Amino acid sequence: MKTIQIGTLDKPVSRINLGTWAIGGGPAWGRDPAKQAEEECKSIATICACPEVGINMIDTAPGYNFGNSERIVGKALRQIGRENICIVTKFGVVWDRKGALFNKVGDTQLYKNLSRGSVLHEIDQSLERLGTDYIDVYMSHWQSVEPYYTPIQETMELLNELKAQGRIRAIGAANVTPQQVEEYLKYGSLDIVQAKYSILDRGVEQDLLPLCRAHHIALQAYSPLEMGLLSGALPRDYKPVGAQIPKKWFQPENLPRVFDFLDQLRPLCAKYSCTTADLVLAWVLSQDEHVLLLSGASKPEQIRANARSADVDLSADDAAMMRELAEKLDQ
């Protein structure tokens, strides 16, 4: 497994990371509550499989089914050893106190709140769920907005305090604009930025990725498989569920075109002896050596499969050809 160094973390991290939004389950994923115990066992087994394939960074958040993802990660950590894993968790999305309106999950309203008191409460809760006394990367989940706006300067002051106390070891920010990244950098070290990036969604390449490159900030790409659409495992008559339903590429006018695109990749899959998922994940990795892939999985066989993409060494010509095919979908 290829690795890179991030900030002042005490160990290099794998370029393939496990994302645990789906592992949290709940209404966002249309899961059957009656199968919760069974799904949790699979999820813990998935996390425990990570060290076997060289994956040592796991991403979670309180907002993933109201703390359930963090609790499951915590249970797995007790089996595989805290020292073997770099944990990314987040702050700023709450449901048990007020803030700026965000979205709803099922019948529960979520809010954005990055105030000092709220974040201090959040980190205590996260540490308890995870069963640890420190977080490797503490990351703002979404950025602060009115009427509960907290300046980035105040957020960074608190994060620097938590870092000095040893409660966190590196600082991250998700869903940020280039201007917000520059604001973070005024007040301390920003080690990692998380943003949506896939072969179908290349918006970060315009400004955000070059900015991260210039400041030696790792970019952690989420949804590189577009919530499973690019996995190559979905049938052409697939009906989106849960959080997939409103997404651009799952719309009825777009789905057939995406399946056509995947069909065009088949010769490359044969050339590299890999799956469609391997190929599109390898494409994202090939765009910059400091890009990390946040790969969602809820079964051990899925994370083992996703780890293979780090071994696919795409040629520059093939990567360019894949980009050209993807760009035609935007026309």
Image: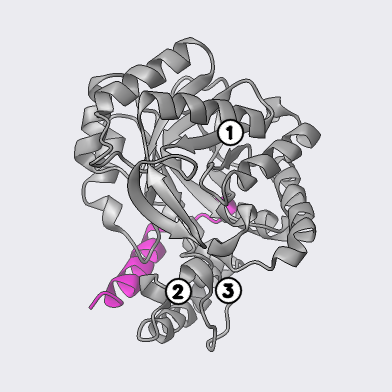
Q: Is residue 42 above or below residue 71?
A: below
According to the image, label 3 marks what residue? Answer: 270
* Front residue of 198 and 282: 198
Q: Amino acid at mark 3?
A: Ala
Q: Residue at x 64, y 42 (%)?
A: 55
Query: Is 318 covered by the magenta stretch?
Result: yes
Helix, strand or loop status at disc 3: helix
Q: Is residue 129 left or right of residue 147?
A: right
Residue at the disc numbered 2? 245
Query: Bounds of the magenta span?
Result: 310-331
Residue 52 is marked as none
* Between discs 1 and 3, the one toward the N terminus: 1
- Label 1 vs label 2: CA separation? 29 Å
Colour approach in the figure: one colour
As drawn, is 169 to the left or to the right of 82?
left
Name the residue: 39% across, 74% down: 249
Of label 3 and label 2, which has the lower sequence position? 2
Image quadrant where residue 149 sits: top left
The disc placed on residue 87 is 1
**Above-or-below relation of 274 to 147:** below
State the residue lying farthest toward the top: 164
Q: Quadrant of the C terminus?
A: bottom left
User: Percent x, y for residue 107?
Assistant: 50, 61
Q: Is residue 285 in the magenta section? A: no
